[in-house]
Image: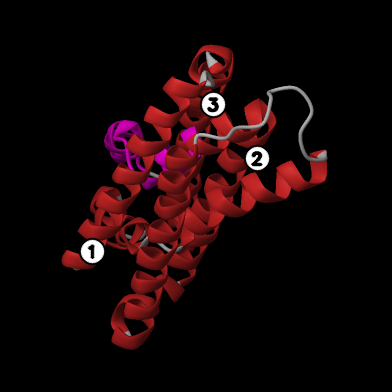
């Protein structure tokens, strides 16, 4: 990997990681609902999806998804449907305003699976992530870079995203007792639901 191109890529990737998106909304909701453990598992789910999509791009599979229109549209509409599903859950929670106490809760295994699943699905069904790996990333590659170099760039982006997700989860977990107050939580759930609906609508009206 050419060092100048690699550092330029990291700078661009870092900025994009910081831009709030559907993953951010899902992370916030999972952390508020299940605490630090569920939030960290959600972050792990997002990172796992980034690794899968980066690896697919490096192996040439990602380009196939973009070329085969029905396959691309299936992924796109799966993402729209999943974001809408999560948005409806958040809005319903805000309307009901019924939240379990912070202490106790479901078993650790259930928390881990719920967090990881939502993080993974929100990211893997977002075709914009795959487009990033296939359209933006190659612009920073020097001629002759092979599959290993492409995978290295992609995994670096996944690592940056994981670091930021963990920082966000830890910050939210520290403030959870304040944020979990019924009035605040209802407002956050409503805002999260609206944000997720917005992301879904944007995905529906744009071709990534």
Q: Is residue 6 visible?
A: yes
| Front one among 6 and 169 | 169
Name the side, left or right, on which 40 lies relative to 157. Answer: right
Q: Is residue 54 visible?
A: no
Report the residue marked by disc 1: 208
Image disc number at residue 41: 2
What residue is drawn where x is 28% and y is 32%?
A: 15
Question: What secondary structure is the magenta-colored segment mainly?
Answer: helix
Find residue 39 and report its image quarter.
Answer: top right
What residue is drawn where x is 40% and y is 45%?
A: 91
What residue is drawn where x is 54% and y is 45%?
A: 47
Residue 199 covered by magenta stretch = no
Quadrant for the N terminus, please: top left
169 up-or-down from 126: above or below: above
Which region is colored magenta?
Answer: 2-28
Task: Tell me the element at label 2.
Answer: helix
3 and 2 marks in contact (CB < 8 Å): no
Give the label, 1 or 3, closer to the camera: 3
Task: Tell me the element at label 1.
Answer: loop
Residue 16 covered by magenta stretch = yes
Report the residue marked by disc 3: 169
Alpha-carbon distance for marks 2 and 1?
A: 27 Å
Image disc number at residue 118: none
Dot 1 or dot 3, earlier in sequence: 3
Alpha-carbon distance for marks 1 and 3?
A: 27 Å
């Amino acid at each position: 990997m050419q060092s100048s191109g690699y550092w330029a890529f990291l700078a661009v990737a870092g900025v994009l990681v910081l831009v709030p998106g559907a993953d951010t909304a899902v992370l916030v909701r999972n952390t508020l609902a299940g605490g630090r453990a569920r939030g960290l598992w959600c972050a792990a789910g997002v990172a796992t999806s980034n690794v899968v999509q980066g690896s697919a791009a490096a192996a040439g599979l990602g380009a196939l998804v973009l070329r085969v229109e029905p396959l691309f549209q299936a992924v796109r509409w799966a993402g729209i449907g999943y974001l809408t599903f999560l948005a409806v859950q958040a809005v319903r929670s805000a309307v009901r305003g019924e939240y379990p106490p912070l202490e106790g809760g479901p078993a650790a295994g259930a928390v881990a699976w719920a967090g990881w699943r939502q993080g993974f699905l929100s990211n893997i069904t977002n075709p914009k992530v795959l487009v990033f790996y296939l359209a933006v990333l190659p612009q920073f590659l020097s001629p002759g870079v092979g599959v290993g170099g492409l995978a290295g760039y992609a995994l670096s982006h996944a690592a940056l995203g994981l670091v930021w997700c963990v920082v966000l989860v830890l910050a939210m977990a520290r403030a959870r007792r304040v944020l979990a107050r019924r009035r605040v939580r209802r407002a956050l759930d409503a805002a999260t639901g609206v944000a997720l609906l917005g992301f879904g609508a944007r995905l529906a009206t744009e071709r990534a």
